[in-house]
């Protein structure tokens, strides 16, 4: 999972999406990172070690014995996240330019249980019927008097 990034005319470097996302988090002062590994775990750990975490302190949550998916991975990593601090999750295969400061400020100011940064885009993976979505959207609109700048109702 590499991407090619231009540094200067005629010169390119290859960086993994993991490196890109760790460096993206650093732009927001996030340098304590937990990385969940399963597939290619030895290669991922070797890359983290060789790069000294790209400047971040990285702790490995190892699920080589069993694929736990997103929810199970978070539960396994829970002891690493229970230090009283807020935490952010990001999938390594996501490229985003979301302003994390705005998302984190919103979460701090309004104190919800959880805040999501999402995009509105077409997908072939709809899980609810149109009437269920319309009903849920209506309920959200009624409850969102001070709507998040991150939630756009279509």
Image (cartoon, grey):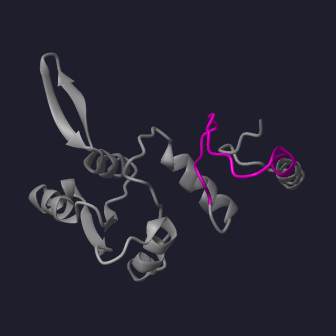
Quadrant in which residue 82 is drawn: bottom left
Residue at point 29%, 51% (across, down): 18
Q: Position of residue 60 (x, y in %)?
A: 27, 71
* Front residue (pair 99, 3): 3
List the single residue furthest toward the left: 50
In the rendered structure, the answer to whether residue 114 lies left or right of residue 73 reads right
Residue at point 49%, 79% (across, down): 84
Q: Position of residue 2 (x, y in %)?
A: 24, 40
Q: Position of residue 91 (x, y in %)?
A: 42, 54
- Residue 96 vertical position relative to residue 26 in the rendered view, above or below: above
Q: Position of residue 139 (x, y in %)?
A: 87, 54
* Front residue (pair 73, 9): 73
Residue at point 57%, 51% (across, down): 103
The quarter of the picture where the N terminus appears is top left
* Front residue (pair 73, 148): 73
- Residue 65 vertical position relative to residue 112 in the rendered view, above or below: below
**Extent of the magenta region:** 115-134
- Residue 74 vertical position relative to residue 83 in the rendered view, above or below: above
Task: Name the dominant secondary structure of the magenta segment.
Answer: loop
In the rendered structure, the answer to whether residue 40 lies left or right of residue 92 reads left
List the single residue furthest toward the top: 9
């Amino acid at each position: 999972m590499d991407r090619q990034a231009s540094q200067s005319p005629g010169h390119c470097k290859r960086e993994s999406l993991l490196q890109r996302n760790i460096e993206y988090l650093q732009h927001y002062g996030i340098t304590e990172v937990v990385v969940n590994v399963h597939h290619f775990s030895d290669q991922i750990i070797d890359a983290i070690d060789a790069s000294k975490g790209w400047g971040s302190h990285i702790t490995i949550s190892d699920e080589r014995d069993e694929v736990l998916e997103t929810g199970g991975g978070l539960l396994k990593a829970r002891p690493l996240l229970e230090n009283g601090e807020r935490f952010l999750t990001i999938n390594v295969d996501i490229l985003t330019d979301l302003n994390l400061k705005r998302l984190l400020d919103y979460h701090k100011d309004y104190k919800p249980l959880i805040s999501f940064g999402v995009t509105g885009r077409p997908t072939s993976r709809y899980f609810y019927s149109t009437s269920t979505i319309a009903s849920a959207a209506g309920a959200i609109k009624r409850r969102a008097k001070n709507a998040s700048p991150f939630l756009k109702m279509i």
